[in-house]
Amino acid sequence: MKWSIIQLQKFRDKGLTLDETVTLDELKSRDPEIRDISPISIKGRADIGSDRVTFHLNITGTLILPCSRTLVDVRYPININTTETFLLKSTDYEGFEEEEVHQVQSDVIDLKPVVLELLLLEVPMQVFSEDAKDDENLPSGKNWEVVTEDQLQQAEQEEEKKVDPRLADLAKLFEQDKNS
């Protein structure tokens, strides 16, 4: 997935079709949440012009991530459709402040860093296994438990209603003041 500008110019009239499968194991070292990654399929085409190369890509594969509740492996499918533009002349870069474009480094276009970045952006903050989604019982241990936001709000409301027995007479006094 690396081409020199001279190689790409040969496909200028015909266009370049991509259909590759790559292994991107270095993704696991860049994000410790990623436990494993399947081979990634990259399909699409490249439109090659005199001043830019535009790749229209479909990236598919599967990430193995830990469940946020139980830490079991969860298969997370990836399906990304993207358009990436590489500018061949650095002088053209000023006109593209609004768009996401890439500059060509040393007359070589390398799609691998772009694909890695796109995959890292697809990693969700939380992922749940099917068992964790269906299970109403949340994890707990000695002196701790996981609660939902609704359970937390309900517990806080009950806590506000409870009055320390030592201060019960004082609470009655405050209620009398409110009523008068």
Image: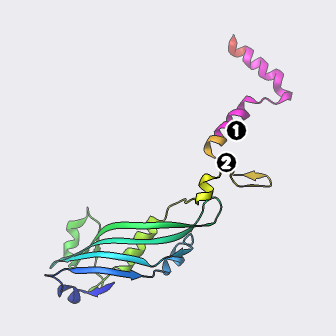
Residue at x-position 64% and y-position 65%? 71
- Where residue 31 appears, x then y in whole percent? 53, 72
Residue 172 to residue 112: above or below: above
Q: Is residue 175 left or right of residue 83?
A: right
Residue at x-position 86% and y-position 28%? 166
Magenta highlight on residue 42: no
Which residue bears the numbered disc 2?
A: 147
Quarter of the view holding residue 158: top right
Which residue bears the numbered disc 1?
A: 155
- Relative depth, front residue between 103 and 19: 19
- Where residue 107 appears, x then y in whole percent? 26, 86
Tell me how the rendering is colored. Answer: rainbow
Q: Which residues are magenta?
A: 153-176
Mark 2 Cα within 10 Å, few/some/many (few <14, many 20+)? some
Tell me which secondary structure the magenta stretch mostly adopts: helix
- Labels 2 and 1 touching (C-beta < 8 A): yes
* Residue 37 badge: none
Residue at x-position 26% and y-position 64%? 99
Residue at x-position 65% and y-position 61%? 70
- The quadrant in which the C terminus is found is top right
Numbered disc total: 2
- Where residue 81 appears, x then y in whole percent? 33, 66
Which three-letter amino acid code belongs to the residue tagged 1? Ala
Quarter of the view holding residue 169: top right
- Relative depth, front residue between 118 and 65: 65
Which three-letter amino acid code belongs to the residue tagged 2? Val
- Where residue 1 appears, x then y in whole percent? 34, 84
What element does badge 1 sit on? Answer: helix
Q: Is residue 125 left or right of residue 20?
A: right
Q: Is residue 4 left or right of residue 21?
A: left
Mark 1 Cα within 10 Å, few/some/many (few <14, many 20+)? few
- Relative depth, front residue between 14 and 152: 14
